[in-house]
Image (cartoon, helix red, strand yellow):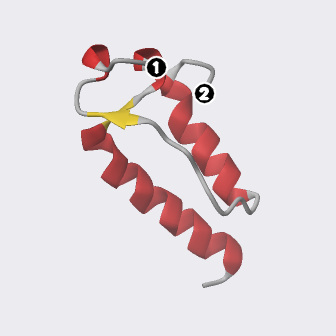
Amino acid sequence: SGGSPEFIEPLAKAAVAVGINGLFIETHPNPAKALSDASSMLKLDKISALLKKLIAIHKLTRGA
């Protein structure tokens, strides 16, 4: 995401859509208090919704 958390979701969706099988997404309950990489983290409470979207894309693109 280049340090911009607003790009995490679209980049992850694009990666899954083209067949990537693994993602590394940094999360933290409070990114502002993270000891490192605070600017590039997704808030922990947003990961569940994102993963549901990514799983749906995975199923659509692989015919599952």
Instruction: Classify residue 38 as left or right of residue 30.
Output: right
Query: Along the line of sight, which residue is nearer the eye, 34 or 3?
Result: 34
Judge the density around disc 2: few (<14), some (14-19), many (≥20) Cα neighbours within 10 Å: some
Disc number placed over residue 37 in the picture, else none: 1
Residue at screen point 34% across, 18% down: 35
Instruction: Classify residue 24 as left or right of residue 21.
Output: left
How far apart are the two marked residues, 2 and 1, measured between alpha carbons? Answer: 11 Å
Residue 18, image x, y percentages: 76, 58
Q: Establish if 32 lies above or below 62.
A: above
Quarter of the rendering containing residue 32: top left
Quadrant of the frame with the N terminus: top right
Of all residues, the one furthest to the right in this rendering is 18
Which structural element holds mark 2?
loop
Q: Nearer the viewer, mark 2 or mark 1?
A: 1
Residue 23, image x, y percentages: 58, 51
Identified by mark 2, the residue type is Ser
Residue 33, image x, y percentages: 25, 16
Q: Which residue is mark 2?
A: 1
Which structural element holds mark 1?
loop
Residue at screen point 34% across, 52% down: 49
Residue at screen point 42% across, 28% down: 41
